[in-house]
Each structure stands twice: as structure tokens, then as C-alpha cells.
Image (tube, coloured by chain):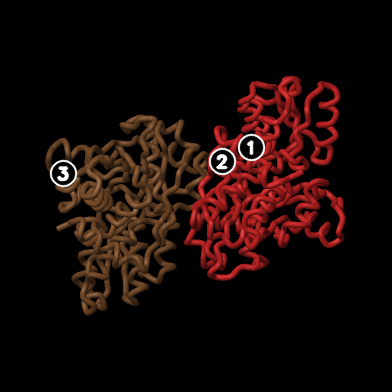
Chain colours: A red, B brown
Amino acid sequence: MLTLESIQAAKRKLAPYIYETPVIRLQGLDEVLGCNVYIKAENMQKTNSFKLRGALNKMLAMPIDQLQKGVVAASSGNHGKGVAYAAKLLNIHATIVLPDTAPIVKVEGIRALGAHVIQCKLAERHIVTERLSSEHGYSIIHPYDDFDIMAGQGTAGLEILAQLPEVDKIVVPIGGGGLISGIATAIKSLAPNVKVIGAEPAVISRYAKSLQANERLLLEEQQSLADALLTLQPGERNFPIVQKLVDEVVSVDEISLHNGMQTLLLDGKILAEPSSAIVIGAALQGILPTSKKENVCFLISGGNVGLNQLINL
Amino acid sequence: MLTLESIQAAKRKLAPYIYETPVIRLQGLDEVLGCNVYIKAENMQKTNSFKLRGALNKMLAMPIDQLQKGVVAASSGNHGKGVAYAAKLLNIHATIVLPDTAPIVKVEGIRALGAHVIQCKLAERHIVTERLSSEHGYSIIHPYDDFDIMAGQGTAGLEILAQLPEVDKIVVPIGGGGLISGIATAIKSLAPNVKVIGAEPAVISRYAKSLQANERLLLEEQQSLADALLTLQPGERNFPIVQKLVDEVVSVDEISLHNGMQTLLLDGKILAEPSSAIVIGAALQGILPTSKKENVCFLISGGNVGLNQLINL
């Protein structure tokens, strides 16, 4: 179960190890985004993404003898870096399974933390992970479909409420649904009037389509700039939470995704990865229900992006 | 005269027109910079630099009939953008004299505000400005050697003290000396124990050398990545203020300047221009007197930098 109490417990457990990342007022973007703009800067988190919160909360909850056999995780990069960091902290072995297409900066960041990296086709990463688990006795650290993971991610929601009590709306990137499940649970428990909105790539709108169909649809693989949001199906444990608590999920086209990153960097002066700038892209695309006086907090989930990815901005 | 009262008056006058830019905690840089890292994000100011503070304070203090004849300013870019913005606000004509070598992003930013741009050799910009002034009756808005300009820039210092009362040290880029004169006057009046340190390019260390010689030396023209800090001589009104109030001026080499910008962008996730990242470069070079528990506020003076300038990072 995911509860407010489990998220509050995660906050206490994680406190010595993670940063309370800043909420930053970006007045220069108010006009172009049509609201009072704030960001929750998880691109400034240790490992440069929110994923450390969930990975570490999960691993701190596991029995030590199980941990010592090692862990394995399928990831587009950020979850893998979180698991690698947590494994280094706990002095255990970690293997991270990445798609061939993962940005170099993510692959190198994980290797630098001492984890073993295996790359395979995007569609095969969960199969490879399962095989490694059964062959070597590694525990699988799932990127989103896990209550301890969601509780860890939800701690970012508790921080937003404490740092910006006057928040009206929170916009969150959505892939498998781990982050938004945690945040929506925290927010709706403590401040039910605050709206929680998910933003996913239009080319892989697994949540918008599944919510409409009222079941977890499995979409076909697609390419998107949002390399961290390529998940093809809502998580089993995440879907009902999103159904119940998230106010709306919007679909962001690739041009707006690109424009979001450009606007955030060149006008906002904040470097985020494309999968995070998607929330800014949603506002630029005009699909967010916002109004001029609203305090909107855009969750900038990660900043693992290489200079090579900026050249085409 | 530059006094605390003149800076406080500037703060009241400027309040409706400028942003109170955020002070941001960048914990991820603590280890590499050797202190508790905060930035004052003037790269997020309107016009993307602190220069608007001084230019607008100056122009708001001028008689309306004088303003209506137009203004002219020599600038490396940021002061010109500040003057152009203020002129647009006041609905008057502005001509900005820029060196041939000014970054394209600065030239275009000024033109976009409706100002007339003239480019000439770096060494000739003040002569060209004088000529335009006498030919057309334009008032010269000096970039630093002016008490109203300094009072405007000093408002950033008042904000830092209010936003971060526990600050121990403030590190400020130094060119002609307008910004640091204003900040040091504000800080030393209200919190004399807070240290104020200037950072200038080692290739044009006009302040370090002049302070040692006890007179305003005129240096030879040099190239530096810090395109906004190419001034060859301390300002006449600025030098005695810096002599009296600034604790130390450090000289940052070109490699550290480059490293400062790279570290701030890739690790700190903040986009600043090279002349602003010089303060981070100073810490990386190991020439700042800092210690682990100190709260150091790095003044990030501007963010007018094009993508074309990032490619070689």
C-alpha cells in the first residue's frame, strides 16, 4: 500500500542521504507560460534526478542478506543511476540494464558510480533483468511498480508543500507512473485542493489512452526526445493510484518538448533533460489549464543531459 | 556620493520594474568548491543581467527633458541591454555602442528592445559614444563610473542580506567596478563582518594591479572568455570605494573561467555567461579563501550566452 504515512516515513529515512532540492521562482517565464512559474529542481538532486529517492528508500527497506547478493535494475538511465548510487552507499553490487539508445551521459554516470552496465534493445530490458536476477540471485529494483519506490518519490511532494504552501498546481512528467503516484498521494492527503497534472509524450501517451480505456493498455515502441519516458504501459500498482488521484494527464508533442527544453535553458537559465522539460513544453503547447494568477510548480525531474544533446536546440 | 541611503532609495524606486532574483542553494557544488554554495541568480533578472538595476536607477533620476533628447551608452552588451530596456520603458531613444567582438546574443537582445546599435573597435567605444553625445545631444549613461549606477547595482546586495542573513562571504565579478562598489557599500554598512571579494580575469587584472600600485593603472587590451570584463582601468569613482571596502580581489585564469562555466552548467544546472561563472572559476582555481562551513554567495551577474558559446565547453 502507498500511504501518506509511508511517504512520511521515507522522508525521515532519506533525510541524511538526499538533498532537499530548491523550489525556484522563475518570474522570467511567467508571461510565456501564462502563470506564476516555480520549479522543483530535482535536476539538482544527488545523481541529478529524483530517482535516488525511490531507489534508496526501497533498498533501505530490504533485508541485508538479500542486499548482499546484489541488485539489478532495468532503466532508461536515471533510475539506474539512483540504484548505482544507493548500492555504492550500502557497499553492495549493482547491475544496470540500459537500452542501446540511452544517452552517453547516463551510461557514463552509472559506470562512474561503480555499477556494472549491460545494454540491450529497449524492448528486452525487462527480460534481460529477469534473467540476471534468476541466474545470479540479484534482487530486482523495479523503476516504478513498487510501493517503496513510490513512497520515496512522494517525498518530493512533501517538500513542495513545505517550501511553497501557496502552490495551486503541480505538473509532473509521467512515464511508468512512480513519481506522480507518490506525489499525488502526498498532495491529495495534505492539500486536496492542489491540482496534480501529468505530462507524457504524445507519441507514447500510455496514461491518457489507458485512462480513457479504463485499463492498462500496452502501446507500441516509439521514438521520442523524452528518453526517460519511453515506458509502454502504466505500472500495475501505479495505474489505480493515477486513476484515483491525478486530475489530468496531458500529451505533449515533440516540437513542444524541444521548445520546453530550449525555453527553460535559454530563458529560464536552467538545464534540464528533455523528459523533464516536458512540463514546460506542456505549458508552451497551451494544453495546461492555467491562469495568470495561479502558482504552478513544474517538477523538473532530472538534469542528466550531455552537451552533445544541446547542439540542436 | 554612494551611501546606504542612496541604495535603499534605489531599491524603492526600482521595485515595480525589476525582479527580486532568487538566491539558490546549490548543494551539489559544495564539495568541489569547498564551502556551502549559494548563488544570487542575476542571470534570471529582466534583460538577464544585473545591469538593468543601475541603468534604470540612473535614468529614473534624470530630468525628463534631458531624457527625451535620447541616451547613448558604451557597453560590452549587458549594460546596453539594460539601457535599451529602460529606454523602452520610458519611451525614449537609445543608441548602444558595442565592440565588434560582442557575442551575437547580446547584439540581438539589444536590437530586439528597439535600441539603435553601433559597433566599433573595443578601444574606440568611449570615443564613439562621446561623439554621438555631442553631435545629437544624447546623454551618456556610463556603465559603472556613476553614483546612481552604483546605487542601482547595490540593490542586489540589499537583497542578498535579506534573502540569506547567514551569508559569510559574497564573491562578485569585477570589471569597471560598478557592481562591487554598490554591493560592498550595502554590505559593509549593514553587515560589516560579511566579506566581499572581487574576481577578475588574470589577463586583465586591472583592480589587483591598481590596488597594489595604489593608483588607477591603465592596462593594455587583452582577449578573455569574460567578454563583459574587458575594462582596462578601474573607474575613477569606483576605485576609492573598492580600495576602502572590498576585502580582496582575486585573478582568475582562462582555464578556470572555462571550468567555472562548465561546472555551473553541467553540475550546477545553471546557465551563466563566462563573465559570471568567473566567481565559480575562482573557487575551482583554489584562490578563494573559503572553508567548509562557510556560506558563500556567488553573484551570477548575467546569463546572456548563446548556444554557439556552449559547444566548446
**Do residues under tags 2 and 3 come within 8 Å of each other at their CB atoms?**
no
Dot 1 amino acid type: Leu
Disc 2 residue crowd, few under 14, some 14–19, many 20+, Cα 10 Å: many
- Label 3: few (<14), some (14–19) or many (≥20) C-alpha neighbours in 10 Å: few
Q: Nearer the viewer, residue A184 or A304?
A: A184
Mark 1–mark 3 Cα distance, whole angstroms, equals 48 Å
Of circles 1 and 3, which is in front? 1
Residue type of the residue flagged with mark 2: Gln
Labelled pair 1, 2 in contact (Cβ < 8 Å): yes
Which quadrant, please, contains the N terminus of chain B? Answer: bottom left
Nearest to N terminus: mark 1 or mark 2: 2
Residue B68 visible (yes or no): yes
> Looking at the image, which residue sits at the far left?
B214
Q: Callout 3: residue from which chain?
A: B
Residue beneath label 3, please? B244
* Residue B184 position within the rendered picture, expressed as x and y whole percent measured from the top left: 24, 48
Q: Tell me: residue B311, above or below residue A281.
A: above
Choose top left, top right, bottom left or bottom right for residue A250: bottom right
Name the mark nearer the viewer: 2 or 3. 2
Relative horizontal placement of residue A55, taking residue A267 as reference (left or right) = right
Measured as percent of width and height from the top left, residue A235 is found at 80, 46
The location of residue B89, given as percent across then percent down, is 36, 73
